[in-house]
Image (spheres, grey):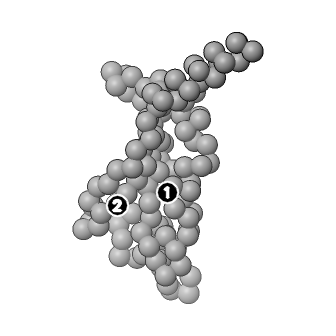
Amino acid sequence: MKRIGVIIAVFVALNLQAQKTTKTLVYGGLTRSYIEYVPSVYNPATPVPIVICLHGLGDNMSNFTGIGMHQVANTQNFIVLTPQAVSSPFGAAWNSGASYSGYQLNANVDD
């Protein structure tokens, strides 16, 4: 039983070092939000990849962080960015260039 307690304590300590923060930036006249996840194994002196996770139509960045990419980041040492798409009549949407019958969601947004 002590062994399980030690394992749990180490797991909690490692997860406390990892950082998940919501940040904003201004681009194209819009304030955009994103969630940044920096794994506990990250060393600022060593360059690491950044993985950008884009949620689907109508979803949001907070919900999409639940896909578990942070767990992969902890084992493979990369930073995860999960941005928020801009609202549209059909929910949050990226300007992907796709259209239906000539209508394109967020055509004026530079994603």
Work out whether mark 1 precedes mark 2 in sequence or the reverse, and give the earlier one. Answer: 2
In this picture, is 71 found above or below 82? above
Where is residue 19 shown, x and y percent of the image? 43, 36
- The circle drawn on residue 32 is 2
Quick one: label 2, few (<14), some, or many (20+) residues within 10 Å? some
**Left or right: where 33 falls relative to 14:** left
- The circle drawn on residue 61 is 1
Tag 1 near tag 2, CB within 8 Å: no
**Left or right: where 22 falls relative to 99:** left
Residue at x-position 51% and y-position 50%: 53
Q: Nearer the viewer, residue 24 or 76?
A: 24
Report if residue 36 is visible in the image: yes
Where does the C terminus fall, quadrant-wise?
Answer: bottom left
Q: State how many labels appear.
A: 2
- The circle drawn on residue 22 is none
Residue at x-position 59% and y-position 35%: 71
In this picture, is 77 found above or below 103? above
Looking at the rendered structure, the secondary structure element under dot 1 is helix
Specify the amino acid type for callout 2.
Arg
Where is residue 1 shown, x and y percent of the image? 75, 15
